[in-house]
Image: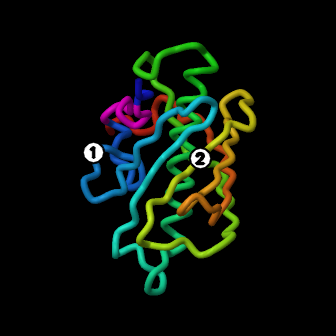
Amino acid sequence: MTSPVFQDHYPENVAHCYGCGRLNELGHQIRTVWEGEESVTRYMPRPEHTAIPGYVYGGLIASLVDCHSTGTAAAAMYRHEDRPLDSLPPFRFVTASLHVDYLAPTPIDTEIELRGRVKEIRGRKVVVEVTVLSGGKPTARGEVVAAQMPPSFGASS
């Protein structure tokens, strides 16, 4: 059985993010699931993500690490509280800190895989470590401190 996709459970008012919003038709629309204790996103770069011919630009990698991590933080908080992903009130996170180390060029013609692990949950913050792989080889590592959004963030004005 496939694990539920985290982003499918984002409330409509916060499902427009360029990286992870299912309602942003021009965005990445990443889809993240649990595989055991790791969160996993697979993403195929597009030609417009080129840095130099044949390779992905670093901004795409940072964007994927960012949104993979905030989705992982939300799913981790649901797990931490033993709640299903569709339970209310919803957990949504924003990035408080993003750090990415680029280890090797990432080919543009190969699917990118992101594997996240929750390093720490402390109050309203979740720290997520991510490894970016291309063809099974690490090309980047990241760490995100994700902060839980206040209920008023993303509310209609």
Between discs 1 and 2, the one toward the N terminus: 1
Under circle 1, the secondary element is loop
The residue pinned by badge 1 equals 23
Contact between labelled residues 2 and 1, with CB atoms less than 8 Å apart: no
Image mark for residue 115: 2
* Nearer the observer, 88 or 120: 120
* Nearer the observer, 91 or 78: 78
Q: Is residue 57 left or right of residue 101?
A: left
Q: CA distance from mark 1 to mark 2?
A: 24 Å
Which region shows up in magenta? 5-12
Q: How far from the left and from the top, in percent, is residue 11?
A: 35, 31
> Residue furthest toward the left?
25
Quadrant where the C terminus sits is top left
Q: Is residue 119 above or below residue 1?
A: below
Q: Main secondary structure of the magenta part?
A: helix
Q: How far from the left and from the top, in percent, is residue 143?
A: 69, 52
